[in-house]
Image (cartoon, helix red, strand yellow):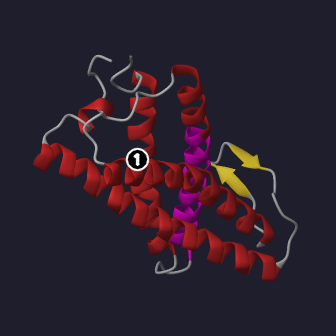
Amino acid sequence: MRMQYSEASKWLHWITAACIFFQLPSGVALDHLPEGVVQNTFYDLHRSFGFVVLCLAALRVLARLYYGAPAAYAGLTPFERAASVSAHQALYVLLFATPLLGWAATSAYPVTISVFWLFDLPPLATPDESLSKSLFKAHKLAAFAMAGVLVAHIGGALMHRLIKRDGVMARMLPGRPG
């Protein structure tokens, strides 16, 4: 029985985490930057990394289907098990929903999304100011929900690492034998 996540799953997890730790603060900062080249560049980067997050989410699902996942850690309390399952399911939904909402909102605005100035994404919605505003609100709500779930997820991981010292977090650290 597998005790740890696959190496692919571990790396996808940490690369996704790095992207999200760029996306969340940059998304908040966008509205506070003065209009101009810097703000436009940050918007372009935010949209590009949003597409990367969407691709990583798809790769994570494929890796999970291909490699599977370890059984829940046997030492978890019923509450910890329920919290873990709920947080992971919410994060997977939000890893797809948040960038898709941003892509659709930007399409309805309408702005072309250029991924790192290499290629353009097709629009997901027709130009519609009212729809764009609603989708951007939903995008922000999803991003704040993700931040909240991440706080709980990171808090749980740190509790297992620093307080319980039970090896739960080690199952997701790259370079450890599976």
Farthest residue, direction front:
78
In percent of the image, x 42 and y 61: which residue is there?
149
Give the class, few, some or many, for how many residues have Cα within 10 Å of label 1's Cα (few <14, many ≥20). Answer: some
Count the numbered circles shown.
1
Magenta segment, principal secondary structure? helix
Who is closer to the viewer here, 178 or 59? 178
Q: Quadrant of residue 152?
A: bottom left
Task: Give the residue drawn at x 45%, y 24%.
Answer: 8
Q: Nearer the viewer, residue 78 or 94?
A: 78
Which residue is label 1 attached to?
Answer: 17
Instruction: From the top left corner, tell me how far across and down residue 66 is, in percent.
Output: 57, 21
Q: Position of residue 77 (x, y in %)?
A: 28, 48
Asked if residue 83 lies in the magenta stretch, the reply is: no
Q: Amino acid at mark 1?
A: Ala
Q: Give the residues in magenta.
A: 36-57
Is residue 48 within the magenta segment?
yes
Q: Who's the residue at 57% across and 64% down the image?
A: 43
Q: Quadrant of residue 127?
A: bottom right
User: Which sits in the foreground, 161 or 22?
Assistant: 161
Residue lying at 46% horizontally and 28% vertically, measured from the top left:
69
Q: Is residue 146 above or below residue 73?
A: below
